[in-house]
Image (cartoon, grey):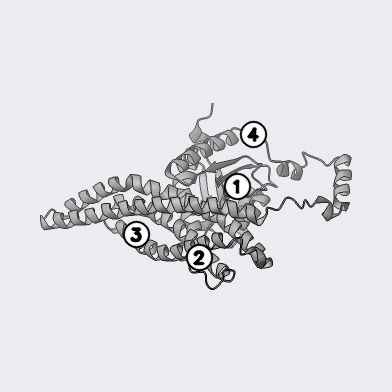
């Protein structure tokens, strides 16, 4: 039986993932994609490839954000293995995955739970949550998927089978396709499918409650992190006053890193939950506002909900200022000692998710103001 470190020896693995941009402002899509990309590479993708002596190649080392170069096309065609991170349904990633599916070679899909495009989630995809435990599980699942693929197990997806001639179109399928193509679009529309405004408002109230609970817990976590950091700062001053030098500072930093381990894990989990909840609510609020703007007579019935959401936008604007300040403090932890770098980066990733969620919430404000009576005070 071939050992793991021999299975991939001399083979290449091309990594397709959302690239993002490290120069984009904190809390923006580009910045979050960049951080997610680096995190996945370091903790999941590269370690899984190393098990098999696979040579991993990163697309972001070949192209700038938004580019698809000739080299990328060549790797999609020729690489022995391709791993595609489908998180967020990035257009470039989806296009590159489609091209890869024309090749009868090992292709593995991975993606963040809840952020997979609906039209490919029927293909086996390793799903993960963006937490420390979730990344470990993803690495283990990816390792097993690579092992199975290199051993020749599994079957190509339908697109690959069709493209490579192993599947054909029967005459019955053609007849059915023609029949459906000639049907009127109106025949397939179900007027009862679209949810009503009241249904959406009920869902919105539940989402508001969920977001409020997450924010309340987050506030406590941030307070705890702040208190631990303040205490460590005082101990640093004491250490310096006692002439303990860099050894004393290093000891304080190591103790702080250990103390921050649990609260930063919680902050990361809540940050992921917060952005997921806000993203779902963003779609719902957008739908409700579209309906109310189209038929303003329904705005009065929704007024209580609109006021609650408007209050949330005010809170989001206020918290964004505090979160940005706390983010700068978290980044400053890296200067104290190497042990604090992972902690600092986890806090940074988490806060960027909160900032992204807050920016989505803030965008609702102007539209709500256009629907609320001037006498309503939020």
The span from disc 1 to disc 2 (Cα, nearest Å) is 44 Å
Task: Tell me whether circle 2 and circle 3 mark residues in contact (CB < 8 Å).
Answer: no
Q: Residue at x 51, y 64 (%)?
A: 310
User: Where residue 283 appears, x then y in whole percent?
Assistant: 60, 57
Q: Residue at x 59, y 36 (%)?
A: 149
Task: Give the numbered dot on residue 9.
Answer: none
> According to the image, label 4 marks what residue?
154
> According to the image, label 2 marks what residue?
362
Tell which circle, 2 or 3, labels the residue nearer the N-terminal end. 3
> According to the image, label 3 marks what residue?
331
Secondary-structure class at tag 3: helix
Give the mark toward the camera: 1 or 2: 2
Does 150 appear above or below 335?
Answer: above
Does 298 appear above or below 342?
Answer: below
> According to the image, label 1 marks what residue?
79
Tell which circle, 1 or 4, labels the residue nearer the N-terminal end. 1
Secondary-structure class at tag 2: helix
Secondary-structure class at tag 4: loop
User: Where residue 37 appears, x then y in whole percent?
Assistant: 49, 53
């Amino acid at each position: 039986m071939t050992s793991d470190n021999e299975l991939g020896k001399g083979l290449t693995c091309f990594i397709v993932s959302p690239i993002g941009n490290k120069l984009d402002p904190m809390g923006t899509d580009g910045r979050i994609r960049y951080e997610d990309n680096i995190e996945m590479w370091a903790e999941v993708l590269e370690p899984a490839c190393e098990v098999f002596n696979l040579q991993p190649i990163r697309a972001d080392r070949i192209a700038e954000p938004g580019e698809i170069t000739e080299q990328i096309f060549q790797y999609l065609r020729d690489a022995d293995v391709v791993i595609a991170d489908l998180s967020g349904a990035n257009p470039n990633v989806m296009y590159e995955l489609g091209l890869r599916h024309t090749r009868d070679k090992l292709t593995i899909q991975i993606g963040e739970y809840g952020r997979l495009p609906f039209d490919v989630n029927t293909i086996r995809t390793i799903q993960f949550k963006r937490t420390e435990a979730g990344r470990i599980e993803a690495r283990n699942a990816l390792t097993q998927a690579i092992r199975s693929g290199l051993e020749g197990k599994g079957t190509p997806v339908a697109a690959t089978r069709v493209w490579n001639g192993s599947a054909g179109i029967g005459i019955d399928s053609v007849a059915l396709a023609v029949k459906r193509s000639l049907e009127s679009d109106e025949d397939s529309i179900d007027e009862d499918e679209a949810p009503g405004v009241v249904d959406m408002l009920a869902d919105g109230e539940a989402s508001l409650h969920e977001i409020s609970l997450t924010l309340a817990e987050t506030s406590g976590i941030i307070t705890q992190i702040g208190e631990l950091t303040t205490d460590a700062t005082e101990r640093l001053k004491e250490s310096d006053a006692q002439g303990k030098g860099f050894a004393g500072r290093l000891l304080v930093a190591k103790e702080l890193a250990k103390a921050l381990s649990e609260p930063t894990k919680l902050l990361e989990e809540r940050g992921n939950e917060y952005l997921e909840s806000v993203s779902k609510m963003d779609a719902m609020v957008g739908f409700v506002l579209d309906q109310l703007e189209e038929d303003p007579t329904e705005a009065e019935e929704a007024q209580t909900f609109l006021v609650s959401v408007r209050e949330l936008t005010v809170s989001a604007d206020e918290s964004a200022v505090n979160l940005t300040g706390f983010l700068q403090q978290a980044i400053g932890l890296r200067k104290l000692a190497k042990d604090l770098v992972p902690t600092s980066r986890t806090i940074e990733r988490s806060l960027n998710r909160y900032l992204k969620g807050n920016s989505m919430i803030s965008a609702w404000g102007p539209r709500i103001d256009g629907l609320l009576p001037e006498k309503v005070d939020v």
